[in-house]
Amino acid sequence: MLRIGKLPIAVFALFIVAFPWIAHKVPPIENYTDIMIFVGIYCLITLGLSLLMGYAGQISIGHAAFYGIGAYTSAILTANYGLDPWLCMFFGIILSAVVAVLVGAPSLKLRGHYLAMATLAFGIIVYIVFNEETAWTGGPDGMTGIPGLSLLGFAFDSVDRYYYLVWIFVFAAFIFTANLIQSDTGRALRAIHASEPAAGAMGVDISGYKLLVFVYSAVLASLAGSLYAHYLNFINPSTFDLFFSIKLLIMIALGGMYNLWGAIIGAGLITFLSYEWLHYFEEFEVIVYGAILLVVTIFLPKGLAGTPEIVEGWFRK
Amino acid sequence: MPKLLSAVYTILVINAIKLSAAFCGELCLINSMEKITVTGQIFQYLITGLTVGSIYAMVAVGFNIIYNVTEIINFAQGEFVMLGGLIMVFFYAVVKLPLIVAFPATVILVTLVGILLDRLAIRPIRHPSVLTLIIATIAASILIKGAAMLIWGKDPYDLPAFSGRDAITVFGAVIQPQYFWVIGFLIIVVIALSIFFDRTIIGKAMSACADNPDAASLVGINVQQMILLSFALSAAIGAVAGITITPISLMEYDRGAMLAVKGFGAAILGGLGSFPGAVVGGLIMGTIESLGAGLISSGYKDAFALIVLLVVLFFKPSGIMGSIEISRIKRF
C-alpha cells in the first residue's frame, strides 16, 4: 500500500504508449483508443477521489460538480470570450479550488456522513445552476463551439494525439499522488483514517489535511472536466448529474480505494462497461451498477486491487 | 438557530412582498376577475409548503429511526417514498383494490423492502465503517431505483385523491382536500411513534439500543432484531409519505434521491436524531422551498432546500433541537 513499485508503472506506461498502435492493428477494438481517452479523463478524477476516500476516509458524492465547473469554465471562457484554452483550464482549477474550500472547510470539521450529504447537496445545486443559467451555460441544451487544444502550433486534433495528451496528464497526476502518499502528508492522512483522536493527539492538523486532499481531488476533477470539454467540443448538464458522482464512487469502490492502482482499474472497467459492454442493458445498466457496488462493498471491501492480498491469505493458511 | 431562521424568513418575506407586488400589479391588469392578493398568494405558498413539508418530515423521521438505532444514514430512505407511491398505484390501478385495502397492502410490501435492505445490504457487511455503510445504502438505492424503472417505466403516475379534488378556497388560497390527508397522516405517524417509543416494551428496547447498543444487548435486548425493526418501521413511514403525496405531485421512479436529500436536510435542520426536530425541520424546509419557488425562482425550486441544508451544516450542524453532546458520543 505504501510503496508504488517502479516495475508496474513501467509496464503500465508501456501498455499505454503502445495501446493506440495495437488498437489500429486489431479491427474489433479500433475505437477503443477513443474510449481510453475517457478512461484517462475519469482516472484523473478517481486518483484524487481515492486519496480522499481511501486515505483520508472521507466520502464525496458531488465530484461531478467540480468536473462540471472545470468543463463549463473552459467552455464559457473559450467559446464566448475567446480566451486561451490553457488559461481557462487554469481558471477552472482556481475556481474549483476556491469552491472546494468553501464547501469542504465547514463540513470536513464534522464527521462521516456530513461531508457525504453536503457534497451531495452541493452537486445537485451546481447541476441545477448549469440547467438554469441559460444565458451562460445554454441550459439543458448545452454549449457548442468549444475549441480543441493546441500547444505551440501543435494541434491535438486527432484521437491518437488527444489520447497521448490526456494520458500524460494522468501519469503526472499518478506520480504526484503516489509521492504525496509517501510523504508526510500521506502518513498524516493514514493516521487520520486509522484514528482521528490518536492522530489529533500526535499533533496532526486533522481538518487541515482533510481539506487539502478535498481541494486536491476537486482540482483534478476540474482539470478532467476541461479536458473533456475540449475533446468533445460540446457539453451539456446531463454529463454532470448526480449519477455521474455515484458512478465515480462505483469506480473507486470496484477498483479499491486503498490503492492508487484501484483508481485506474475501476475507472477503466466502469468506462468500458458503460461505453462498450453494457449496451445490451440500455438504461437498465443502473441495476448492474447497483449490483456491482453492493457486491463489492460486501465481499470485496478493498476492491479488485485488494484481491492479491486475499489470494495471498489463502496460500499462507 | 432561531436568529438565523428569522433572518432567512425576513429576507424571504421582504422579497416576497416586493415580487408579489409586481406580480399582482400585472395579474390584476390581465385578469381582473381573479383577484390574487399578496396575502392570499403567500397563504397559498404556506399551505403548499406545509403539505410538502409534512412529507419531508416523515422522511426525516424515517432517517432518525434508523440513525438512532444504528447510527447509519440510510441514503435509500427516499426510495421507500417512491416505492410507496408506485406500489399503491399498482394495487389501486392494476389489481383494482379499494383505497382502504391498497393502503395497508402497500405499507406491508414496502416494509418488506425495508427488511430486505437490512438483511441483504447492511447486515452482511463484516467490518462496518461509515464509508462502507454509506456506500451500501447508496448501492441499495440505485438498485431499488433501477428495479422501479424496470417495473414502472419512466412515466409519472397519478392516484385519485382520497376524498375527491374539490378544492376549498380560504383567504384566496386554493386548498385541496388531499393536503389535509397528508398533514393528518404526519400527525398520526408522530402520535403512533411517540406511543410506540414511550409506552411499549419493544419501543423502549429500541430506544435503549439507540442510547447504548452494548448495554442494551447485556440486558438481553436482541440488537440485530431492533436494527431490523428500525428499517421496517422507517420503510413503513416512507410508504405512508409516498402514498399520501402521490395524488398531489404524482410519482415516478427517480424521485427518491431528491426526497432523501431534502428529508435529510429536514432531519439536520431539526437536529439529527430528534423526532420533534424532524417534524419542525420538515415543515420549515417545505415552507422555505414553497416560498422560494413561488416568490424567487421556480427553476431553483429544488435548490432552496439544499441551500438550507448546507447553511445548517455549516453554521449549526446540531440543528434546532439536537445537541452537540449527543452527537459527540455517536460512533459515526
Image (cartoon, coloured by chain):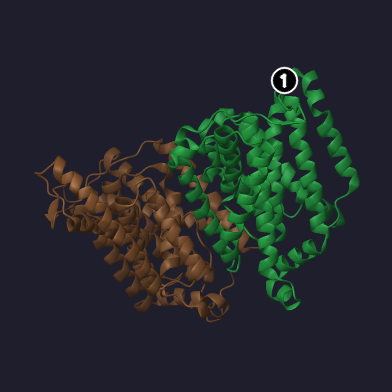
Q: Colour of chain B?
A: brown
Q: Does residue B267 sit above or below A94 in this rendering?
A: below
Q: How many marks?
A: 1
In what quadrant of the picture does the N terminus of chain B appear? Answer: bottom left
Q: Is residue B150 visible?
A: yes
Residue at 69 percent of width and 38 percent of height: A86
Chain holding disc 1 = A
Q: Does residue B230 sit above or below B116 in this rendering?
A: below
In x, y percent, where is residue A254? 68, 46
Is A1 left, or right, of B158 in this rendering? right
Tell which of B293 and B226 is nearer to you.
B293
- Name the quadrant containing residue B253: top left
Residue at 48 percent of width and 39 percent of height: A136
Which residue appears farthest toward the right when viewing the image? A7
Q: Does residue A248 sit above or below B328 in this rendering?
A: above
Q: Colour of chain A?
A: green
Callout 1: helix, strand or loop? helix
Residue at 70 percent of width and 44 percent of height: A44
- Name the quadrant containing residue B292: bottom left
Is A100 left, or right, of A34 in this rendering? left
Residue at 53 percent of width and 59 percent of height: A118
Which residue does the numbered mark 1 point to in the structure image? A28
Which residue appears farthest toward the left when viewing the image? B33
Q: Is residue B182 visible?
A: no
Tell which of B222 and A265 is nearer to you.
A265
Q: Amino acid at mark 1?
A: Pro
Tell which of B261 and B294 is nearer to you.
B294
Is B315 left, or right, of B292 in this rendering? right
In x, y percent, where is residue B58? 36, 61
